[in-house]
Image (cartoon, rainbow, N blue to C red):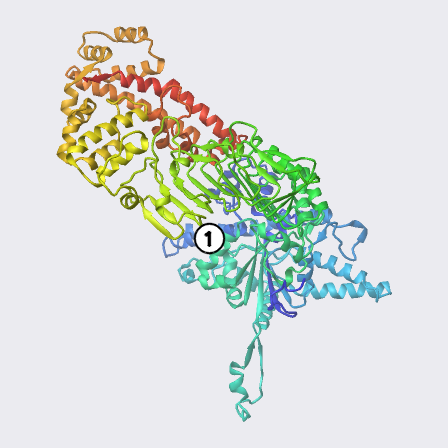
Amino acid sequence: MKGVLNEVDVEGRNKVVVVGNGFDISVGLKSSYKDFIEYIKERHHFSEDLELYEYNRLFLRKYEDFKLNWSDFESLYEETVRSVNNRVQHEDLQDSFEITVINDSIKKLERDFHDYISDEYQKWLKKNILPQYGSSAKKFSKNINPVIKDLLSDSDAFFINFNYTNTLEDLSEDIIFEKVMSDDEITDESERRAKANREIKKIQNRIAHIHGSIEDDNILFGGGFADREDTKNIHYSKSLLNDKLFRIKENDKLSSTRKVIMDELDKKRCEELIFEDSAQYDSSGVIEKNSNYKRENKFDLYIMGHSLQGSDFQFLSKILEDADRIFIFYYETDYTTKMEELIRRLGSSIIEKVKLVPFIEILFEDELLINNFGMYQTIAPFLINKFPEEKILDDLSLTSNHFIFKHITDLEITNENVDIVLKLISSLNKKRIKTPIKKISFLGEMEEHEIESLCKSNALIEMLESVEKVSFEDTGISIDFLLTLIKQGNDLKQLIMNHCVFLNNNESEIDLSVCESLVRFEIKDCTFNPERAVQKLLFNSVKSINNLEKIIIEKNANIVIDSSVFGSAKNLLELSIVMSDTDDYENEVHLSNLELLYIDCSASSFPNITVGNEIKEITIVGYQEEFLSLSSLLKDNESLFGFPKFETLQLNSPDNITTFKNIDVDVPLDIFSKDIKLIIDEVSIYIDDYYKQYKFKTEESPSKSNTKEIIEETILNIINPNKKKNQRIFSEFKKWYAEISGSSDDSVDNEFLDTVKNHLLDADDATNISKDNSSVDKNIAASSKIEVKEKIDFSEIDKLLFEYSHGKINTDNLLLFLNKKGKSNLVIEVYKSIIDDLENKSDFTQLEVFDLKKLHFERAKLEIIKRFSEEWFVSSDQLDFSALEYERGMDPIPNLKKINKSNRFEEYKVLHPNTTSFKYLQLLKSAWQEVLDEKLLPLEEELRQEATAYE
């Protein structure tokens, strides 16, 4: 695929490939430290980890879970040697003996592991090699990944193998044998085999086993003490016998192998330019032009299956520093420890050279999902773990078993990848591999057969049950598929459709209320192409209540979004409508909880929509009328009054309104606020300035014939004070407010009235007016704690508690009284705790007993709220607010919306894995209602009855 590869990827680029134990594990060999431990346990019938330690000192007890890899084992060996040497720096018979034991232990470990890995290697060969190929060359029953084929076949690649098996050599036999056997230019069978053997030998000459092999019977374990600063502290004789470099020098085969490696690395690093007697014949300045007599020969370093930890790091560090680029092949998230080790040992600059590559499947037998980098790029946008664009990955081959597919959270389906995605999710579904996919996007134009294949995919339809967001962008949408999505989407929260064409499937009505979990619905610039010209696609809400919180509707053709969709959305917070010339919303819809309203009526008349007391912002584009009254938009919800959250009215490009005179603020707003603004295009005005400039320019009071005039007279006298009139005006305003809010004149008392009063009257006048109202007695009392408590009329139970504290009645008398009063078990339990607390409190006053009782009931309430918060993973503060406002039978439950928003559903789901988010919210509401009615309300009612203040 043109343009895919980086320019630096040229033929002949030198490569050094470091192969570790992860490579052997990936091809199916049981070569891990844990596997070896299990083998020792089974072979010697050990049942306890202590027996392992007694068998071999290096099986350290402090790591009894044995969740280690080989580099951890080597580090522990080094740590053991150092700890012995650090005790006392003089010859000690016991310490010297301990060093001998450690050295014997590592030799014993080598022998055991040689036996183990030799057996496992033979088992692996028998399992994976086809028998019909005989001994001439090995042929695997599984396919070898083309990336591995390319690396092994590359004459510029040199392999430093830290493993003891010949898996690399075995793979090379298969690769070369297949290549030579398919060469039509060779006709003679013996010549064909001879060439195959020569080519295999060439590859195997580029593979060096740095720590020995089972074939050469020279595997070695040990530490890496050489070149370490603290080596000088190792003073006991024979402590360094199992240093790897020491051991390598002891063995001719290993020593010669190491020399080959070092020579090869030097060759990769540079090429010497030799000039005989160059100093004598430098008349042309050759030496100056070729300073240091060498030319850098860049090489790439591939780390495949090595942890980059332990005693090997000292050897690898120089290679890492000299490499031009470093490709770290990783599995799952093990790259994090590798990167941390690089930064810790070599500094952060080394990371600039690193490219992370998900570890490939070396052997596979399943059908390929991806067979080249171009195919991979079609699905790369939604993958978390990504492959870099490199020449070595030209023939990238992946099956659905690859680990990167287990972590997909988003799917992006296009016409380029639809077949790949469907094959992937079908395979994952068959293997019962659960993926955390929460979002699916359909992007770009698709052929009808591609859309049909989506509709017929059982795996995709099953996946829809747990998806939370589905979006369609610039694509065709099958109505049948959309109906299935709405029906199956148990967790679907967002449905977004932009620039789409709906394909007719003999269906023309979609009931959004079927999807009870849906909270956001967006449909913009979409078209329905019906078979009959007059037919339209209808979105509606058959149920009287849906759970939508945000709706966006913009410029759709042949599509009707019925007003029932937002009219039934009792939790709707945001509504945005850009109307087309065919949209018509004649039936009045009141949106009681709406906070944000955006209407573009440039192409149609303004819809019959009103909003309630929660509204914050209203934006209208293309308003066609000459006059706008806020009362035509803002309507009080039942039992509520005023619009305390209102901040902005913005008119953009209105047809006939050019001045704020044409806007009538005929609803109660906070005229003292500096947050409320009216805006016409680029011109804005704050509400207080609006009243001064456009509403009241005289002191003349109009007759009070309606709500509007009452408000206007009040505000007029705030702006133009008249003390003689203001006391009368406030009294009339308060009576009017009590009437319109459904309260008695005596009981009405709130922050809104206090604000009006303080602006109409100065401090002295306000105090005098207050004294005329009996409702302020509690405010006066509240200013003095002592004064309030002197006016308490203690209840019957308060008096009995006081008598009990002074020994006049016993516990049985108290409990009998409570049972006769019909107190609930919960309330009685609280009283029992009070009784216990009153033991030896004979010096308590009646008031102190009263305070103790109140304290116990408050504690009981808080404990119930705390337990509920912990059980349902919601905010205790929000529960507390809800409980404070709740009265029996109240619907909706106060503050339920904020309780829901505070939920930590993912934590709840850990304990209840089969619960959907929608079901969780239903159960939460039911459980909270029960706690309110059966626990908190009885406690609250007991507190309310504890004492009353004199009126």
Q: Could you say whether the residue bearing mark 1 is in a helix, strand or loop? A: helix
Please tell me which residue lies in front, 920 or 21. Answer: 920
Give the percent coordinates (x, y) of residue 828. Answer: 32, 13
Q: Would residue 396 be seen by someone viewing this image from the given angle?
A: no
Please tell me which residue lies in front, 41 or 174. Answer: 174
Mark 1 Cα-neighbour bin, 10 Å: few <14, some 14–19, many ≥20: many
The residue lying at 63 percent from left, 38 percent from top is 536
Give the percent coordinates (x, y) of residue 593. Answer: 42, 33
Give the percent coordinates (x, y) of residue 214. Answer: 65, 55
Give the percent coordinates (x, y) of residue 440. Answer: 59, 44
Dot 1 amino acid type? Ile
Q: In which quarter of the image is residue 859?
A: top left
Which residue bears the numbered disc 1? Answer: 99
- Left or right of 854 on screen, residue 535: right
- Left or right of 303 on screen, residue 231: left
Quarter of the picture holding the C terminus: top left
The residue lying at 20 percent from left, 11 percent from top is 799
Please tell me which residue lies in front, 915 or 538. Answer: 538
Q: In this view, does 831 lie above or below 453?
A: above
Quarter of the picture holding the N terminus: bottom right
Q: Would residue 155 be seen by someone viewing this image from the given angle?
A: yes
Please tell me which residue lies in front, 833 or 282. Answer: 833
Q: Is residue 33 above or below residue 199?
A: above
Q: Is residue 589 above or below residue 96?
A: above
